[in-house]
Structures are given as C-alpha cells and as structure tokens.
Amino acid sequence: MSKVEFNKENGPREVFCGLTSIVWLHRRMPDAFFLVVGSRTCAHLIQSAAGVMIFAEPRFGTAILEEKDLAGLADAHEELDRVVNDLIARRPEIKTLFLVGSCPSEVIKLDLATVAEKLNTRFLGQVKFVNYSGSGIETTFTQGEDGALKALVPLMESTDDEKLLLVGTLANNVEDRFKKIFNNIGINNVESFPPRQSTELPKIGKNTKVLLTQPYLSDTVRDLEHRGCEIIYAPFPLGVEGSTKWFLAAADAFKIPELKVHEVIAPLANRARQALEKHTEILRGKKLFLLPESQLEISLARFLHNECEMDLVEVGTPYLNKDLMEEELNLLPEDTKIVEGQHVEKQLDRVRASNPDLVVCGMGLANPLEAEGISTKWSIEMVFSPIHGIDQAADLAGLFSRPLKRNQILTSKTLATH
Amino acid sequence: MELTLWTYEGPPHVGAMRVASSMKDIHYVLHAPQGDTYADLLFTMIERRGQRPPVTYTTFQARDLGGDTAELVKRNIAEAVERFKPKTLLVGESCTAELIQDQPGALAKGMGFDIPIVNLELPAYSKKENWGASETFYQIIRTLLKDNVNEIEKINPKRWKSLGRRPKVNILGPTLLGFRCRDDVIEIQRILSEQGIDTNVVAPLGSSPDDISRLTDADINICLYHEIAETSCEWLKRNCGMEYTTTIPIGIKNTINFINEVHEKLDLPLANQEELEHKSKLPWYSKSVDSNYLTGKRVFIFGDGTHAIAAAKIAKDELGFEVVGLGTYSREMARQVRAAAKDLNIEALITNSYLEVEDAMKKASPELVLGTQMERHSAKRLGIPCSVISTPMHVQDVPARYSPQMGWEGANVIFDDWVHPLMMGLEEHLIDMFKHDFEFVDGHQSHLGHTATKGPDNKEDEHGRSNINIQKKGNVIWTDSGRAELTKVPFFVRGKVKSNTEKYALSKGLPEISDETLYDAKAYFD
C-alpha cells in the first residue's frame, strides 16, 4: 500500500442518510416498492432529494409514525399491517416490498424483520417482503443500497454454475455495455445484482465470482462470501485506468490471458483517452477537495489525479473499508490526505485555508461555497449519472471540468469586462 | 400511521429553520441525526441562498445512543456558541431526538451562557412545518420580550400623535421558503410609506434579536401571514396591548380593505381613497372587453390557507370566475377556509393527500387550476392550465424578477399569471369561429405549451385530435346524432357537457341521447 495519510474526524456532519438511495434503487427495480417506516422528516427528505412531484404515484412512500403509534408497540405493528394492506390493494403490480427502517423506527425498536416475516406468510406467492435500515444513525447515503442488497441475498437461490456477478446498481446502458465487453473478452455468463426486475434475482454459489461496480457494499459482500461466492478485488470501474484494471481482475479470475483483455479494450481506451484530453486541459494542476458523502470519493480522487492530473488537497469519505478499497488506495499518490468521518465546520475551515479550485460536496454546501468564490460539484450527481466504464470516462471528467469552464466563461468575458 | 407518498409540509423543525435562517445573529442547535441535514438544501438550492442556514446538527449515531448523548449535545452547543457567537441561541430536537428525551434546551440553559436561549419544543409526530415556524417565531418574541412587557405601558395605536412622529408598524410573518415573501415585504412597505406610515421592524425576514427587542416601539403590528405570525401577534396584543391587522392584502379589494384597516387602527385619516382603485392595472384589465371571456371560467383552488382564501376572493369578485373547488393543506386554517367555501356554496377540501386533491380536481372539471407545484403537475396530467399560488416552494417560485402577490403590483402579477395560461378572449372567439374549418386541429390550445386533455373520457390520438370515447353509462346510449353534436362542443368543456347530458338523460329516464337531448340538457343546466 502506498503511504496515504489516514485521519479520522468526528463532529457535526453534512451528509444524506441511507434513505436517499431509494431514489435510484426504485428506478432500477420498477416492480419493487420502498416503504419507509419513519417520520414526516423521512418523507420530506426523500421528496426533497428526489424532486418527486413529477410522478403521479411514486414507487416509494413513508408510513409516517404518529403520536398514537409511539404510545404502544403492538399498536404500531398493527398500524403498519394496515398501511401495507392498503398499499398492496392500491398497487397490485408490486412484486417486492422493502420495509425500510429509519432513525425513529430504530430508536423505538420497531421489529421490521418480524413484520416482514408475517407479511411474507400472508402474501405468499403474491408479494415478497424484505427489510433493511436506511436510518441516518447507522447509514450514510449510499450505504442504504448496501442494506437493500444485503436484504435480498437470502432470497437468492443457489447454483454451482460458473458466472460473473456484477454487484451494485448501474445505469441500464452502462450495464449492457459492460456485458458486451465481457462477452468480447470471453466471459459469457454475466449477471447483475440488483437485477432490473426484483423477481429475477440471480442464483449464486461457490462458482459465482463477484465483481463490485460500487465501493459502498461492504455488508452485501460479506453475505455473498458466506454464500460461497468468490470476491474479485479490483479498483472500481471509474475512468480508463480503473475500468481497465477492473476488467483485467475479472479476466484473471476466469483465467483469461491479459493479452485478450488488452486486445478488446485497447481501442476503447485510446478513444477514451483522446476524449479525456479536452477535460484534462481544464483540470490539470487544479486543486481538488472532496467532502465526504457517497463513498465514491477515493475512486474519484484516483481518477481525477491519475488521469486528469488534478492535485488532491483532501479526500473525505464517510466510511472507509480498507479491504475493499485496498486496490484503490494503492493507486493514490503518496501522502494523499484521507479523512474518514466529518466535522463539517473544521473541514470547511480547511477548505477555505487551502483555497481549492474545485470542491466536491453535497447540495447544502454548494451554493454557499460558490458565493465565497469556490467552484463546486455536487456529489449526488455521481450516483444519478452513468459514469462507470471506459466509454463514460470523458463524461465523468466533464462533470468536474464543467463548473471550472463555466466559471471561466462568466468571470473572464461577461462580468469582468463591465 | 399514515401512508404518505408526498407531503405539502415538512416537519416542524424545518419551520424553525425557516425562521432561524430568515434572521441574523441567531443560531439553532438541532439535536438530530446526520440525514436531517438534507433540510439545508431547501435554502441553498430552492432559495439559492449563498449562506448556509445557521444550524448545527448534533449528528448523533447509533453507537452514541448507549453512551452519553447529552454530552454530545453540550459539546455541539459549546462549539456553536464559540464559533458563531449568536446573540440568541435556539435549541431544539428533530423527530428522532424527541424520542431520546435529552432535553437539549434545558441542557443549554444550564451551561452558563450570557445570551438568551430559546428552548424549542416542537412535537414532530403531531405537528408540521408552518406550525413549527409559527411556534418558533412566537417563542423567540416571548423569550426576548417577556421580561420587559410588564414595564411597558399598554401600547395605544394612536400614541404616534402625542409622540409627535409618523405612525410606525411592524410587518410580521414573512420568512424564507414562504411564497413570494421577499417581494411582498417590499410592496407592503411601499404602500405604507405612500400613506406616511413607517416600518419599524420586518420579522422574521431580515431581522435580528435586537430588532425583536424593539418590536414594542411600533404602534401596531401587521400580520402578513396568519400561518406564521398570528400566534405572535396575539401574544403581543395580550401582553403589550398592540393591535394587529387581519386583512391579507392580496387582490385589489383586500389591499384597499387592508389600507383602511391600518388607517382605522392608527386613527389616521385616509386622504387618497379614490386613487386606490387606480393603483393597479387589474381592475381595468379585468373590465376591458377582452376579459369578457373570463366570465364564469371554472376555477379550482388549493394551497395554504392564506393564499387559497385570497385566491378565491380575487377569482370571484375581481376576475368574475366561478370557484368550483377550494381547499387547503393548512389544518390550522381549516375553519377560515371552510367559511370562505361556504360563502361560495361549495364544500372545502381539507387534506394532506395530493391524490385526494387530484380526484377532487377531476370531479370539478375546472378550466383553470390555482394550486401548489403539485397541483401544477396534476393539472398537467389532466390537460388543465394551472398557475401556482402557494408553497411548498419550488425553485421556479423564487423568480429573479420582482414578483409579489400582495398590493398593487401583486394584483398585476396575479392578473398576468392567472390569465395567460388561459386562452385569451379574442383568441378563444376566433378559435370558436373557425373550429369547423379543415385546417383547425381540435385540441388546439394556442400558447399553453402543454398537451391537451387526456382524461379517460377524452383520449387524443398522436395528432391531438379528439377521439371521444363514448361508453354506455347506466342505460343511456349516445345516438349518432348525439355523438356528432358532442364533437362540435369545444374540447375544453366537452367532458363537462358529456357528463351533464348523461346526468340529465338518467334523471329524465331517457334511454338514448340524441342531438336534441344534448340541447335539452344544455337548456336545463344553463
């Protein structure tokens, strides 16, 4: 491992909780419904993060706890039962219902596992119920997906067939592209988890080789390992370098010669490097500060430094799993400052003191930093945009070069001349 | 437990944040887990604020729950006071912290600070955002003034005369994330200063704790938004004798009523009564011949209490619309909205469920919807023009241009915003004249920019042509002549004509609807 500098910080944070991941999970599995058992705050959080007004009826909702539910637990279980019955009567097309725990439901110890078990018996053959926690006292932002996927693992049937399992939500077009490239490399049995339909869960077993597409799936990985799956450790498929090493690691697990991978990937990589060049021109030598939010920060830092030649001031991450991130950490420049956790005030002091050219941060902080003259990129865009793979490398770089380019346009031509 | 897919109002602590963020020199320590920080984006993204809300979230985690969360609260309070040096500290909790019962307000008071501390207890499982804002504003005023009120003589609204100065008022209620508050304040101040009335303090928006302390320098209060300021105005009346106005100056009539109310309370003669009618273009625009076509337009209204009631009055009295639906999500204002609906001979819809609102909208078959951003989406699905009149806020509700709802300019803005989505009179007339020409595409809605009606009874093909789906209803059958006549009815009232005719046929026990039945029904309902 290269000598990166690890720091831990505690204090007030400025991050989303795990409930936010419902925003992309429900789009990935259109036959599933996500029912948060929580408060008005939970409902307001999801609708504010997702801007849900465009839907007639979204595939997620909140069973809002009221005063009378808090009085006695038996009552709350019955109430939840009633809400679920109403929901299923109204939305008969639902195949899987995720009961999602929240901060208040965790604190009052509402036993969603037991509720799910009872409902599974009652709705056998019609709807499957699983539960996980997206609460902010346990999870940050993307960790919600980890919880949701982990909850599905017990429903996956066993098989001894050899296959490559891509784990982590991908944009559909990126997923198709990856499968095609794997086929060209010579890996034909490729499946994805989560699948596009919640009922079409891939089968897994001792000949399943798991390749992660997202870095925030620690708990899911552990459970897949318990089911006998082999985990392929690799950098994550962001940028040309990360994606290439990711394909190589998969090929290695399937004993496909490296040369074959390069043969398939080389033209794509060359094309992508050319496309990257115009972004690198803008990003080269610029100072980058990443605040913690999505757990993609380390991979993004590696891409933006190694391929776009940015200088890393500080790389924040809400949580660091050193095992899953080892390959990424090895690719970071020496003395990279990594900070796990957050004290948002102290971190903003460091932002101001280091005078960065670009800060990656949440939506609550972006405009205030812009108002101070610091360019920003919202991290939530990374989880909503197709950014994975060699073909998307230039698009990914574009997310970071655009604010700098815009800043240049506005300050040098329009405003400064007046 | 209540299943909620979307909510008009956030939790009460978001209301507290609206008040805190509206003010200066104030800081709010919120005992809350990390996810609650989402609320910052309401201010930085929707309002495009260049400052973070003055809020410290204690960010407790599951692992803290076994230990000492009270210590965590105290550490955050100490850090926030040291760093931000507020003149007044708000301390409260969000839904989850309410369950842990650390009592952060009491903890803060025991820490020996020499600044006022406002302990906010906002029940997250029974109350909502506007209530939270109202309670927070009231608690700030109470905390900062309660020690002085006993020394203050009851404030006589006429005292400005003996003090030898111009009358002075406070404008209470405007906050961030309130509908067009930013511009309403400017408009109202302009109107008051024209009448020789000074503004003492505007609060919460733009005020500091020092400003709150000098609220009693004014002669009366102006309660600009009942949802936010009524409780505070009542307290100031009870404890300091300060009178307050209750008329909301939205629309011409109520702006004039408001000016009259202010003058009466202050015992200030109103010199320019006749001028007032001409301060806004709305009365003349509404009178001009083109607006003839607005007569009796069916309008469905839903929003917060203040804006929904105001909209109903303007719609009926100033634009000559027919109000066919009126409702609110503000339970605190249900009584007033019900009364306003009763005056219009309709039943008020009081609900938090946007699906219920959409159903009511469908049933009322309006030609214009005045609602929140959610009703804009519902109306779009139903192919009905809509104008937004109320929170919850959307980035589009914070326009770059001056765009108040209140006062003279507010009336101008309202005329434009409500009438432009409708077809203009002359245009409507021409469309009616030429609708049988072959060039005419049924479903033409000029500049409305949305797809035409796609209701279940009125499906359109890809060219926008209407393909009326006539089904048997009860025992009534549409004959060919009846069907042909129905296609000649303008598309925007066709649904209503169809259902009225069927209702008529059923009530008369007619087995068939011919062209004649349609005209019989028309005569019956006209």
Image (spheres, grey):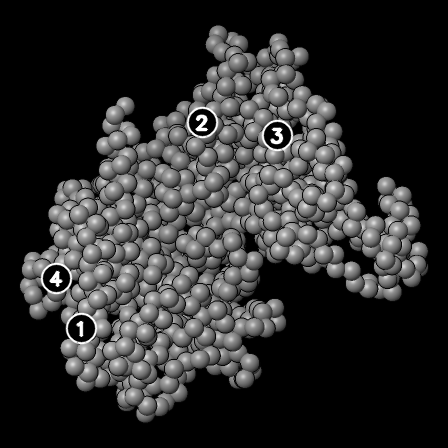
The residue closer to the viewer here, B322 or A408, is A408
The answer to whether residue B126 is above or below residue B324 is: below
Question: Residue A262 bears which disc, if any?
Answer: 1
Callouts 1 and 3 on one subunit: no
Mark 2 lies on residue: B202
Select label 1 or label 2 by which is in front: 1
Quadrant position of the C terminus of chain B in the picture: top right
Q: CA distance from mark 4 to mark 3?
A: 60 Å
User: Which residue corresponds to the image point at 7% horizontal and 65% vertical from the top-left?
Assistant: A2
Task: Return the x and y of residue A396 as percentages of the image width and height.
Answer: 27, 56
Question: Residue B415 bears which disc, if any?
Answer: 3
Select label 1 or label 3 by which is in front: 1
Amino acid type, residue under disc 4 in the picture: Leu
Chain containing the residue with disc 4: A
Amino acid type, residue under disc 3 in the picture: Phe
The residue closer to the viewer here, B500 or B459, is B459
Mark 4 lies on residue: A332
Select label 2 or label 4 by which is in front: 4
Which one is earlier in the sequence, the residue at label 1 or at label 4?
A: 1
| Tag 2 and tag 3, C-beta contact below 8 Å | no
Q: Secondary structure at mark 2?
A: strand
